[in-house]
Amino acid sequence: MVHISDGILAPWLWGSGWVITAAILAYTLSKMKIDDVPKISVITAAVFVASLIHFQAGPTSVHLVLSGFAGVTLGILAYPCIFIAVVMQAFLFQHGGVTTIGINAVNMGVPALISFLIFKAGMKLNIGISKNEILFGAIAGGTAVALAVLLLAIELLVIGEEFTEVTTFVVAAHIPVILAEAIFTGVIAGFFATVKPEMLSIKR
Amino acid sequence: MISEIDIYAGLSSPIHRWDPRLKVISIIALIFSIMLLYDLKLVIISMLFAIILVYISRIPFSFVVGRLKWVFLFMMPFLIILPFTFIGEGDEIANIGSITLNFRGIESVEFAVMIVIKALTSVMLIFPMIGTSRMDITIKALEDLHIPNKLVQMLAFTYRYIFVLSNEFVQMERSLTSRGFKRGSNLYTITTLSKAIATLFVMSYEQAERVFYAMRSKGYSGKITTMHEFTLRPQDWFYTVVVCGFAIFVQVAVWYSTLEGT
């Protein structure tokens, strides 16, 4: 799973996770209006429910992350969304640890923000109604997970090269997820473009 | 589909009666303290303390263990791979094709075990912390603890919508099957599922908006209102002191052992 449990990462690492998360949260929450609460909550609930969809990838099971989807629909508010989703997954479902909430939010939230920027840039080009959204939604979706896995891999390796085998294993298990999320986010973005454009963070 | 963490909030135990605000703060402090431990003996003692807390809270162990299974599953790769790769050179014990397994010694097994016990302990403590109060009361406790209001509102709404969405997801699967849809490992499956899920999102979003504006029109101001009043009694402080005391105790124990030298 892309989020990591307690006890594995070193304290300075999960400590910095908290510091970074607090900073980004402070900024993004200041940009949030009370009227955004329903939309963000529904998307957050979706991210949460999606994490329950497991699929077998070799000896372990992985689940959809949907951070790219959050980036595409919420823009910078994807960060509080991912943060709350991580908090709830840790407390309600015991996916991921409590001390690692900060670093998990960074691992999945920052790629969500980056994928939003990619989507935003992509929307400036104009390939065609909904084809634009599908393509860049897909790129956003795939990148969000790929970056998240990359960050996690770097963090595991920082603890020591002894973690190399475990890291390779975790990375390999997530490759099908990257693919699935790219397709999923692309299709959904295209759907929203035609059916309910206001759900996307960037409207034409 | 999702069994709620506060399903046993209706039971009666000292932990249930512990003021939710102090309960949350103390157990979070405990979790952080235990995660800072790197001594196997102290970690095991902490796990025993956690087990005692769960026992006092009367939450059935079967429920806790059922959830711990998932954590253990996630930790399995670490437990199996680490002893063979962590800490220095080791004795070669097997040679499978091009992969050489080096057993790195008992310390690496201890380290792997310690990591697993820490993860399990932290999860175990979540049960007395939020499994002993109704979720809306816990959320009100967070508001009282000055967690930013926007986050508290998000927690409250998101919690409700998790159950709405998962029910609708189950219904959606049923209607797909009733129209002859079969899950396969192909592009068609994933695009169909994606579009169905997208429809779900649109409906949920519209519903959430309607609910929110209805709440606003009835005077919702963002403050969590339940009938439950928070009061502090001496028993609350007793448990706070015991739990925080233990959290401090293990850190002192670490510091003390570094004084004496390794």
Image (cartoon, coloured by chain):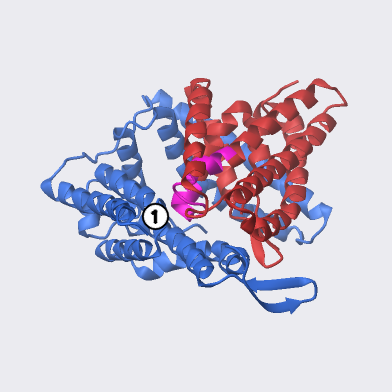
Q: Which quarter of the picture shows residue B64?
A: bottom left
The boundaries of the magenta stretch are A87-106
- Viewer-nearest residue: B105 or A140: B105
Q: Is residue B255 left or right of residue B238?
A: right
Instruction: Say what secondary structure mark 1 lies in.
Output: loop
Mark 1, residue position: B37
Instruction: Identify the residue at horizontal 36%, vertical 65% (top origin).
Output: B41
Is residue B204 something one can see in this rendering? no
Residue B250 locus on image (x, y percent):
30, 55
Of all residues, the one furthest to the left in this rendering is B234
Residue drawn at the location 53% of the way across and 42% of the way down: A103
Q: Chain of mark 1?
A: B
Q: Is residue B27 left or right of residue A18?
A: left
Would residue A98 be counted in the magenta stretch?
Answer: yes
User: If the image is split into quadrants, where does the N terminus of chain A sit?
Assistant: bottom right
Type of the residue with mark 1:
Leu
Q: Nearer the viewer, residue B166 or B66?
A: B66
Q: Which color was chain B given?
A: blue
Pointer 1 local density, CA inside 10 Å: few below 14, some 14–19, many at least 20: many
Q: Position of residue A89 (x, y in %)?
A: 50, 49
Q: Determine whether B214 is above or below A142 in the image.
A: above
Q: Quadrant of residue B95?
A: bottom right
Q: Overall secondary structure of the magenta stretch?
A: helix
Residue B215 in magenta stretch? no
Decide which of B188, B5 is in the foreground and name it. Answer: B5
As drawn, the chain in red is A
| The C terminus of chain A: image quadrant | top right
Question: With respect to residue B29, does A193 lie above or below?
Answer: above
Q: Is residue B49 visible?
A: yes
Looking at this view, name the residue that lies furthest to the right: A127
Picture residue at 52% right of the left edge, 70% below the top? B109
Percent x, y for residue A17? 51, 38
